[in-house]
Image: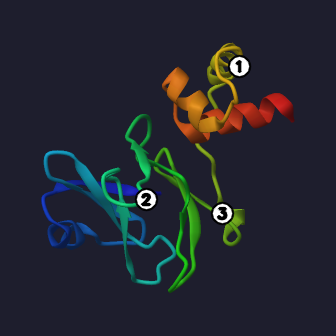
Amino acid sequence: MVRMFGDAEYRNQAEAALRAPGDTCMVFRSRPRSIIMACPDGCGETLVINLDRRAEKAWRFDMRGEGLTLFPSVWREGGCESHFIVWRGHILWCGRFEGENREPPYNPEIKDAVICALHDIQPPSAVEFAEAIDELVWDVNRAAVRLVG
């Protein structure tokens, strides 16, 4: 699980709030700047996940439902090399620890919204669907997989 410890104005303030793997705090100065996260695999490192589209690659974030959602996945290319998804406050591992994964509850109503949006979006992608129907990208992707699977 991801535990969110509110907002901080600066990175060092956000880092001070982290206590356990998966703990997060948002750096917020007039707009969301970044998520500071204690690496969820327990390696002890702190991750800085950019949310500001004006600076380099930026993740989408949403606080609907049970907690923090980030898109795309977080993939550390150095250090512990963890790869994971943050979805509705859950950590879903990619490539290791997968047996411990617990997806958030499925909402079948999203499937109907995806079907309706199929006619309006060309070419369709999970990101475009999510924007069109105001849903989380991971939820839309799961609904689409169930529709074609």
**Amino acid type, residue under disc 3 in the picture:** Glu
Instruction: Return the residue at label 3.
Output: 100
Give the quadrant of the C terminus. top right
Describe residue 29's horizontal placement relative to residue 49 as left or right: left
Could you tell which of marks 2 and 1 lies nearer the N-terminus?
Answer: 2
Residue located at (50% from left, 86% from top): 79
In this view, 115 is above or below 20: above
Q: Secondary structure at mark 3?
A: helix
Left or right: residue 97 versus residue 41 is right
Callout 2: SS: loop
Asked whether, in this view, residue 117 is left or right of residue 37, the answer is right
Q: Circle 1 sits on which residue?
A: 118
Task: Work out whether residue 133 or residue 21 is closer to the camera in this orientation and state it.
Answer: 133
Q: Position of residue 35 (x, y in %)?
A: 32, 59
Residue at (48% x, 25% y) in the render:
134
Q: CA distance from mark 2 to mark 3?
A: 29 Å
- Report x, y in % for residue 39: 44, 73
Residue type marked 2: Lys
Q: Which residue is mark 2?
A: 57
Residue 91, image quadrant? bottom right
Query: Which is nearer the N-term, disc 2 or disc 3?
Result: 2
Q: Residues within 10 Å of mark 2 (few under 14, many from 20)?
A: few
Residue 105 visible in the snapshot: no
